[in-house]
Image (tube, rainbow, N blue to C red):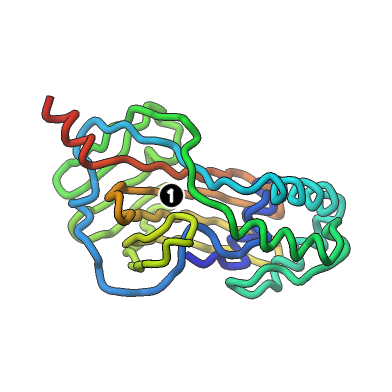
């Protein structure tokens, strides 16, 4: 999954100049291939415990990121302009206003390549509800953006807080060095914005079937910026095991 400059803009404003926006790539790669699995085959029906996940970085990457956050927060308009001009799949060009030396910036870009997916230690009871072909998700909080998801498990069409998001694109990866390892997956994306006013609305869902564990990983984003001001920034990743879910339901 490549992250566009617009998505990078969302991250810098919505997450207080967070660590991820400098590296334009995210969890995975991106391509457009035929459907790799049936959605119904990777979705529970009923109670399911989900495990909240995050990307872990090295201590050195976090140390350098904090220095950049402190420097860039004093010159945010300049940095937003750099984000707007950034090329997809490429980090921003070095500038002393990042608060790092050129050597440190190169080190930072190397260090963030060592990120990996890890559990936060948080497990949440949830319910995947299927009504006909439509799937919804209940995590016990009706105000959570996840509660707005409506997924047609047959056609693949996704609806969320913005209404119709659309149909998925599919991709596959067999490189174990990627942050989430090898996978087959699909992505839905709604993205609208005005780069001149720094107004952005993004809703994105990824569902990956991880190889060889067979676990299912979701990442859902529902974020909005209006005139550089973050109105909402929701970004969560979680995984579950269909095998353990099926065993629990059988008891």
Instruction: In the displayed orientation, state which residue is furthest to the top.
Output: 251
Classify mark 1: residues with Cα within 10 Å, few (<14), some (14-19) or many (20+): some
Residue ID at (39%, 55%): 206
In which quadrant of the rendered view does residue 211 lie? bottom left
Instruction: In the displayed orientation, state which residue is furthest to the left.
Output: 250
Q: 178 and 67: which one is in front? A: 178
Residue ID at (44%, 40%): 145
Q: 103 and 137: which one is in front? A: 103
Q: 108 and 91: which one is in front? A: 108
In which quadrant of the rendered view does residue 8 lie? bottom right
Q: How many numbered tags mark residues here?
A: 1
Badge 1 marks a residue whose secondary structure is strand
Residue 32 image point, x, y percent: 36, 74
In the image, 125: left or right of 1? left
In the image, 76: left or right of 159? right
Residue ID at (47%, 61%): 178
Q: Which residue is mark 1?
A: 219
In the image, 203: left or right of 183? right
Residue 73 image point, x, y percent: 81, 49
In which quadrant of the rendered view does residue 169 lie? bottom left
Residue 149 image point, x, y percent: 35, 45
Q: Which quadrant is the C terminus positioned in? A: top left
Residue ID at (70%, 66%): 83
Residue 165 image point, x, y percent: 38, 58
């Amino acid at each position: 999954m490549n992250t566009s400059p617009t998505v990078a803009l969302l991250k810098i404003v919505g997450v207080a100049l967070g660590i991820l926006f400098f590296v334009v790539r995210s969890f995975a790669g991106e391509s457009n291939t035929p459907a790799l699995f049936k959605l119904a085959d990777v979705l529970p029906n009923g109670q399911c415990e989900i495990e909240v996940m995050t990307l872990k970085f090295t201590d050195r990457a976090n140390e350098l990121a904090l220095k950049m956050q402190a420097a860039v927060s004093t010159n945010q308009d300049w940095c937003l302009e750099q984000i707007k001009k950034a090329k997809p799949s490429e980090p921003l060009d070095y500038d002393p206003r990042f608060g790092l030396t050129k050597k440190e910036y190169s080190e930072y870009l190397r260090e963030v390549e060592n990120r990996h997916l890890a559990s936060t230690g948080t497990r949440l009871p949830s319910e995947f509800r299927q009504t006909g072909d439509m799937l919804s998700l209940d995590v016990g909080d009706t105000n959570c953006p996840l509660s707005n998801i409506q997924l047609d498990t047959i056609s693949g069409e996704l609806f969320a807080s913005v209404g119709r998001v659309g149909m998925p694109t599919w991709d596959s990866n067999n490189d174990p060095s990627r942050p989430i390892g090898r996978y087959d997956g699909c992505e839905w994306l709604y993205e609208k914005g005005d780069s001149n006013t720094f107004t952005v609305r993004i809703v994105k869902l990824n569902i990956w079937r991880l190889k060889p564990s067979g676990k299912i990983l979701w990442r859902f984003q529902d974020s909005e910026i209006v005139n550089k001001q973050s109105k909402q920034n929701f970004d969560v990743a979680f995984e579950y095991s269909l095998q353990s879910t099926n065993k629990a339901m059988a008891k």
